[in-house]
Image (spheres, grey):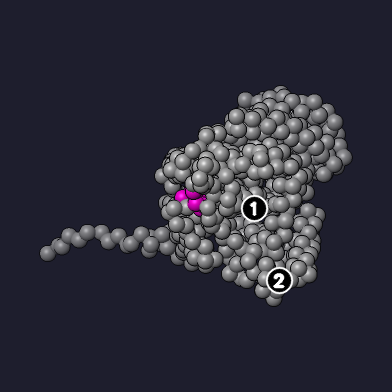
Amino acid sequence: MLIRTTQYRPPVAIRIANSTGGNHKVFLFVGFVVLLIFWSLWGKGVEQKYYDQPQTWPSEAGKIGAEILFSGTGNDVSSLVVGRVYQGSPAWRAGLEPGDKIVGLDGKLITTPNQAAHIFDVSMNNTVLAVTIEHDGRNVDLYILITDHARPDKTTKCRLLTKPQKIVVAAIFLILTAVMFFLLYKNIGSRVLIISLFTGLIVILGFLFKIYSPIDAFFAININTISLLLGMGIIASVLDQTGFFGSIAFKFQQVAGNSRLKITVLFCLMSYVLSLFANNLVVIMIIVPMTINLAANVGFDPRPVIIGEIISSNLGGASTMIGDFPNMIISSETGIAFIPFIANLMPICLILLGVLLVILKTRSHEFGELVNKQAHPQKMTEPRLTSKDRSVIRRALFVLFHMIFLFCLSEWVSLSTSAVALIGGLSLFLFSGIDKKSLLSRIPFNDILFFTGLFIVVGGLEATCLLEYVSKGIVFLSFGKVWLLSLVVMWSAAFIAAFLSAGPTTALLIPVELGLGMQPPHHIIWWALSLGVLAGASASIVGATAGPVAVSLIENYSKKYRMTLAGGNTLTSSQFSKIGLPVMFTFLAFSTVYILWMNLFYMN
């Protein structure tokens, strides 16, 4: 007798293991991502408990962490004054002190404590309110960043040291950090190796000086930024491996034809658009080889176009929350949602993109033409997408669309954007249909390790109280004017980023900005930081991580296509600066007008 049986289907985990040859690295990676998802959701609470900072203060203190009371006796007219201010609260960080008389809130006259409490309570988290207080007979505006939790004070151990000890410790940490950045600037050896060495030194010395323990170093890592980088990196890797980016670049090449102006405009536009959601390195590694191939066919020097592509990718990265490292770091640390980045940064970045194209048109002649116009390059062929590739692309774009949709909702439903990015990336990693071992080889683990070490080094500087003094110095230079504070931040960030690169500059300045005693409304200080880093990253070949990668591609592909470029088959720092420096100062000029307009618009 025949017995009909159903076909056995093993569990999902076993099927995944079989599809990857049982590679344990895949399971380790999946486990790592799952841990990051849990930490993205609940890690902040763990950190608050470790540093013994309350998640919330008493309800009577409201969102700002300060009591608002009536004052006045007898014939005196009653007025609103500040009562107790809780340490670490938004009011404490803004400089509000017990006894301060409150005149107005957010441009409105305030007459009762209930009225003040209502304005604070209905304000959304991560918004800034202007508090007008009476000080020495005149009205002064303080700006409070609204949040419902205290930011842990990580300098308490340093405050226990004597003043000479503080100076010695701060000097040692500062020297180590300066040497590290010098080695990174000179590109001496692997940047991951350099950052690992100095991370170890910082943690060891911090432990010996009893100001920065290994646990402090762990909490200094911005897990949300790492998670965003990893989640978006998976999606970009999937699209890259299927030939999606290459296919788009080929279609742009067909439209551009042999017109150098069209080539410059279209390839810069493509760099900008792709960098809105994909890492700059992925974009540059796809576009630069195609630019060199096209230049060899047409007969022009590709270096000005490639410089334009690098700067355009910087502009694309600065236009959204997920475009590049600086905005990822800003979003993770401040909680600013997806839509405000686009609403406040994309308009000015599109203007700057137009300015860049004008500069490229006027400065490209300085590079000259090809020395040999008799090159015989290989003809560019269209990437062939199989039916499987097209299916994977549809899945990846489906996941990306839904991630962006959830990013847009995060401001209203309190979604963790880093958890959304990780869940989307993990689902694509498991079910895209692409070989998982191949995907692992494309994920930017070196960038993740680099930024992990960088956060630890910056955490060490913060533990010495050094960054706190830098914050006070910036406030001093602004003379109490919030518009001037924004400009000081932006211009400082630009000059630092030109030497240290965009990501490290942002990581270094984030704790400085968070420690400022005053904050302009509507996140203007963070838009100023992002625009300053953008300008500086466009000034030098080391300003953006894509710069050195582009140089390597030029050297390799010029040999492949038998091209000879004036001044050598490379892109030097001085050649980049011919375009980069005018771009930086022009960007800063336009951004200065934009930031001043924002201050004027939001504060009137």
Q: Residues within 10 Å of mark 2 (few under 14, many from 20)?
A: some
Q: Residue at x 67, y 34 (%)?
A: 595
Q: Label 1 amino acid? A: Gly
Q: Residue at x 55, y 38 (%)?
A: 104
Which picture quadrant has residue 186? bottom right
Q: Is residue 380 above or below residue 443?
A: above
Q: Note whether residue 443 is visible.
A: no
Residue 579, disc: none
Residue 161, disc: 2
Quarter of the N terminus within the rendering: bottom left
Which is nearer the N-term, disc 2 or disc 1?
A: 2
Residue 515, disc: 1
- Front residue of 312 and 118: 118
Q: Separation of disc 2 and disc 1 at Cα?
A: 21 Å
Q: Label 2 amino acid? A: Leu
Point out the stretch of residues depicted in magenta: 62-69
Is 66 magenta? The answer is: yes
Quarter of the C terminus within the rendering: top right
Is 565 magenta? The answer is: no
Residue farthest to the front? 75
Percent position of residue 602, x then y: 59, 32
Q: Is residue 413 above or below residue 29?
A: above
Q: Is residue 155 above or below residue 294?
A: below
Q: Secondary structure at mark 1?
A: loop
Which picture quadrant has residue 3? bottom left
Q: Secondary structure at mark 2?
A: loop
